[in-house]
Image: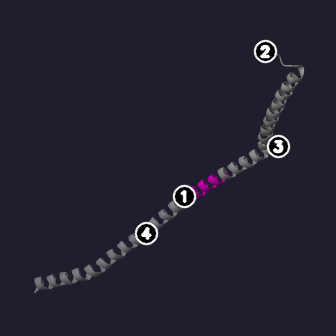
């Protein structure tokens, strides 16, 4: 027959198992404490969220300001180009008018001289 364990042995086994359970429970609590140590408070999370939201808003404002500055710059550049084109066209028109007057002032005396020669030859 197998001998049944006595009360002392049962108590000893029970104590061993309780010690193992306590050790496992303590290890679990230690792991849980480490995880809790990595958690942040609601206030800290909200503060970080506000900081991130402010940073994103600042970046969005910077982008909008840059876009507006570029738009204004493009409008100013277009106006400057149009003004330059008008000044260049005006200068070209003046040059053409001057060239016409130069041609006319040279051709009229030559034409009159030739006409005078023709009249003199036909009259003589």
- SS for dot 1: helix
Name the residue located 89 percent from the left edge and 23 percent from the top edge.
Answer: 8
Residue sitting at the far front: 1
User: Counting residues from the N terminus, which is met first, the one under dot 2 or under dot 4?
Assistant: 2
Closer to us: mark 3 or mark 1? Answer: 3
- Which residue position is annotated with label 4? 88
Q: Are marks 4 and 3 in contact (CB under 8 Å)?
A: no
Name the residue located 18 percent from the left edge and 82 percent from the top edge.
Answer: 114
User: Counting residues from the N terminus, which is met first, the one under dot 3 or under dot 1?
Assistant: 3
Q: How far apart are marks 4 and 3 (CA)?
A: 66 Å
Mark 2: few/some/many CA within 10 Å (<14, 14-19, 20+): few
Q: Looking at this view, is 18 or 123 the one in front?
A: 18
Q: How far apart are marks 3 and 2 (CA)?
A: 65 Å
Closer to us: mark 4 or mark 3? Answer: 3
Residue 75's spot in the image, x, y percent?
54, 58
Residues shaded magenta: 61-71
């Amino acid at each position: 027959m197998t001998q049944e364990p006595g009360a002392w042995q049962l108590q000893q086994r029970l104590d061993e198992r309780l010690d193992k359970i306590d050790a496992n429970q303590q290890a679990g609590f230690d792991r849980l404490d480490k995880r809790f140590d990595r958690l942040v408070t609601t206030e800290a999370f909200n503060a970080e969220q506000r900081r991130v939201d402010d940073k994103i808003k600042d970046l969005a404002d910077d982008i909008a300001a840059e876009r507006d500055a570029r738009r204004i710059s493009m409008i100013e550049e277009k106006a400057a180009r149009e003004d330059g084109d008008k000044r260049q066209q005006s200068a070209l028109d003046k040059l053409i008018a001057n060239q016409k007057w130069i041609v006319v002032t040279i051709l009229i005396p030559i034409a009159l001289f030739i006409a005078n020669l023709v009249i003199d030859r036909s009259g003589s």
